Amino acid sequence: GSAKNPVRVFQDKGESAYLDRLRCSDGTKPLIARIRPAGQGPFRTMMTEYKVDCGTVSPGTVAVFMDMHFKHHDENRPVPGFTITK
């Protein structure tokens, strides 16, 4: 989920579902806050930036960029440093 390679999902429901499945390195759920619209991404669609916070647990606090304009794509890979539940 970087600005150059955002997490691809469909609509805000897809963003929420993906973020809900992310886990910190110790298996706990991170705290998540929507930061801001992040401008046009590499796929020429608008992105959103989220703050994903594991506190003192690795990977700490990370900015995750998401692009919700992918109707037939459901991202199953975790953002680096995280795991993801099925």
Image (cartoon, helix red, strand yellow):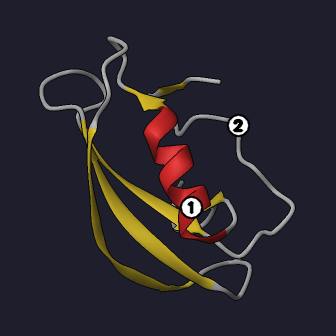
Residue 75 lies left or right of residue 65; in this view the side is: right
- Front position among marks 2 and 1: 1
Place of residue 19 in the rendered image (x, y in percent of width and height, measured from the top left) = 46, 46
Residue in the picture at 46% in, 28% down: 82
Residue in the picture at 77% in, 69% down: 70
Count of all numbered marks drawn on residues in the image: 2
On residue 13, the disc is 1
* Amino acid at dot 2: Asn
Specify the quadrant that holds the N terminus: bottom right
Residue 48 lies left or right of residue 84; in this view the side is: left
Residue in the picture at 48% in, 63% down: 65
Place of residue 4 in the rendered image (x, y in percent of width and height, measured from the top left) = 60, 67
Q: Residue furthest left?
A: 56
Specify the quadrant that holds the C terminus: top right
Q: Estimate how packed mark 2 is, as few (under 14), some (14 to 19) or many (20 or more) residues with alpha carbons within 10 Å.
A: some
Q: Classify residue 68 by image quadrant.
A: bottom right
Place of residue 64 in the rendered image (x, y in percent of width and height, measured from the top left) = 43, 55
Residue in the picture at 45% in, 40% down: 20
Between 80 and 9, the one nearer to me in the picture: 9
Residue 58 in the image: above or below residue 43: above
Q: Which residue is mark 2?
A: 76
Residue 31 lies left or right of residue 72; in this view the side is: left
Residue 22 in the image: above or below residue 1: above
Q: CA distance from mark 2 to mark 1?
A: 15 Å
Place of residue 66 in the rendered image (x, y in percent of width and height, measured from the top left) = 54, 64
Residue 32 in the image: above or below residue 45: above
* Amino acid at dot 1: Lys
Q: Earlier in the sequence, mark 2 or mark 1?
A: 1
On residue 75, the disc is none
Secondary structure at numbered mark 2? loop
Q: Residue furthest top?
A: 26
Secondary structure at numbered mark 1? helix
